[in-house]
Image: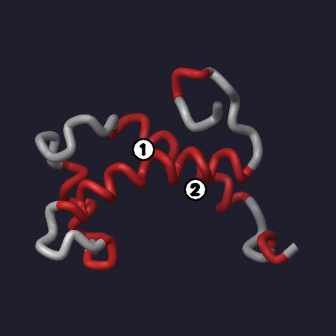
Amino acid sequence: MGHAQYSGVPRVTHLAKSLFACDELSGFLTACALVKPTKAIADVEVASVRKKMKDKAFARGVNRRTYSRAWRNWASNWTRTSRFAWKR
């Protein structure tokens, strides 16, 4: 249930927040890959994703506000924890 914003299920753990952020981003990255001649995710560059994120006409169905909120929430957890926390 944590995949969907509308479910109201709180995302408390790092895993739940990571899953939500990745879930939101994966659809957009797929759209970015599909406009490439090779249609390969490996050919998608960070700069082009950032540029396309600002273009409201590109992948209109992606809710950029939800994506941004999910990503900021996920990133804020990693800046507050030790950089070695993942090794435990």
Left or right for 24, reference 40:
right
Q: How many marks?
A: 2
Which is more toward the observer, 36 or 77? 36
| First along the sequence among labels 2 and 1 | 1
Mark 2: amino acid: Ala
Residue sitting at x 67%, y 61%: 78
Residue sitting at x 33%, y 59%: 29
As measured in the structure, the alpha-carbon distance from the residue carrying label 2 to the one carrying label 1 is 10 Å
Q: Secondary structure at mark 1?
A: helix
Q: Quadrant of the C terminus?
A: bottom right
Seen in the picture, residue 73 relative to 85 is either above or below; the reply is above
Q: Secondary structure at mark 2?
A: helix
Q: Contact, CB < 8 Å: mark 2 with mark 1?
A: no
Quarter of the image for residue 79 reads bottom right
Residue sitting at x 21%, y 44%: 59
Give the residue at mark 2.
75
Give the residue at mark 1.
68
Quarter of the image for residue 80 reads bottom right
Left or right for 66, reference 81:
left
Q: Position of residue 34 (x, y in %)?
A: 20, 61
Q: Position of residue 71 (x, y in %)?
A: 50, 50
Near mark 2 (Cα within 10 A), the count class, few <14, some 14-19 or many ≥20, is some
Residue sitting at x 60%, y 50%: 19
Give the farthest residue toward the right: 88
Seen in the picture, residue 36 relative to 15 is either above or below; the reply is below
